[in-house]
């Protein structure tokens, strides 16, 4: 029996990933979650993550 991997589009990097978390309706892949946790507010990437998190109420699609 062939098992199909379920992927979702990460709301941060916008890549199809198999593993991650759901924050409200937003899927965040493991890599982005790790990067977000280790980003300091003074870093430029911090603002990028804030902008992406504003999309939290929009569902990500399964493929």
Image (cartoon, rainbow, N blue to C red):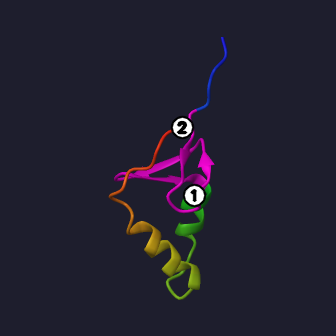
The residue shown at (54%, 68%) is: 36
**Residue 1 picture location, percent across and down:** 66, 11
Which mark, residue 26?
none
Name the outermost residue toward the top. Answer: 1
Residue appearing at x 53%, y 88% in the figure: 42
At a point 49% along the width and 58% down the height, the residue shown is: 11
Q: Residues within 10 Å of mark 2 (few under 14, many from 20)?
A: few
Marks 1 & 2, CB-CB < 8 Å contact: no
**Percent x, y for residue 17?**
61, 46
- The part of the image, by quadrant, that contains residue 23 is bottom left
Rendered view: 6 above or below 19: above
Q: Taking 23 as reference, is 39 above or below it?
A: below
Query: Residue 40, position in %: x, y?
Result: 54, 81
Q: CA distance from mark 1 to mark 2?
A: 13 Å
The residue beneath circle 1 is 14
| Magenta-span inclusion, residue 28 | yes
In the displayed structure, does residue 1 sit left or right of residue 62?
A: right
> Start and end of the magenta stretch?
6-30
Q: Earlier in the sequence, mark 1 or mark 2?
A: 1
In the picture, the quarter occupied by the C terminus is: top right
């Amino acid at each position: 029996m062939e098992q199909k991997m379920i992927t979702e589009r990460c709301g941060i990097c916008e890549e199809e990933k198999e593993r991650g978390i759901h924050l409200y309706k937003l899927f965040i892949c493991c890599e982005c979650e790790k990067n977000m946790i280790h980003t300091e507010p003074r870093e430029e990437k911090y603002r990028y993550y804030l902008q992406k998190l504003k999309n939290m109420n929009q569902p990500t699609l399964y493929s």
